[in-house]
Image (spheres, rainbow, N blue to C red):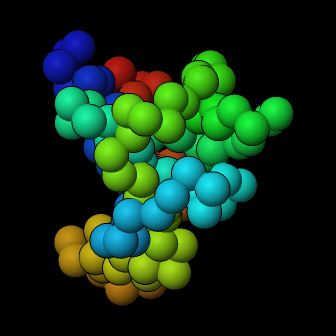
Amino acid sequence: MKNKRITLLVLLFVFLQSCTVYNSTSVSLEEATDKGKVRVFNNAGLEWVFKEIQMKDSVFYGVTSKDTLKIRQNQVSTIYTIDKEESERKTKLLKKSLLYSSIPMGAGLTVILVSLVLLLLHGY
């Protein structure tokens, strides 16, 4: 019973996902400032994803949902900004394929989500 609920929650999570596509060309910290979501790699290959990069008093900060972290310029190897156009296109394609590949035409995401929630609430 518990495994079925976990499976349904995972399916619900998958339906609510969106795709994030990043530009293939690295930019400088200055160019990435106030551009929205970015991926930052350091010289050791570690990756951070920030909601945005801000600059205050000539110091760069990466903003996450929980923290604001100071970015040391000499330790950054590459920075990729989000490709908003391509991200939106891929998200639309993903949702379209999820909606219409396995269910009859005319049924919408709302029907699927409501069905999953009802199954969860009624002890599927």
Q: Residue at x 29, y 24 (%)?
A: 5
Q: Residue at x 63, y 44 (%)?
A: 53
Image location (x, y in percent) of residue 41 = 33, 41
Q: Quadrant of residue 47?
A: top left
Quadrant (top left, top right, bottom left, bottom right) of the C terminus: top left
* Up/down of 70 relative to 16, above or below: above
Residue in the foreground of this view, choosing between 45 and 18: 45
Q: Residue furthest top?
A: 2
Image location (x, y in percent) of residue 88 = 49, 75
Image location (x, y in percent) of residue 69 = 59, 23
Residue in the foreground of this view, choosing between 3 and 46: 46
Q: Residue at x 50, y 29 (%)?
A: 72
**Left or right: residue 4 compared with residue 87:** left
Q: Residue furthest right?
A: 57
The number of discs equals 0
Residue in the foreground of this view, choosing between 98 and 49: 49
Q: Quadrant of residue 1?
A: top left
Image location (x, y in percent) of residue 97 = 28, 76
* Up/down of 40 relative to 1, above or below: below
* Up/down of 45 relative to 102, above or below: above
Residue 63 in view, yes or no: no
**Left or right: residue 8 compared with residue 119:** left
Residue 74 in view, yes or no: yes
* Up/down of 21 relative to 11, above or below: below
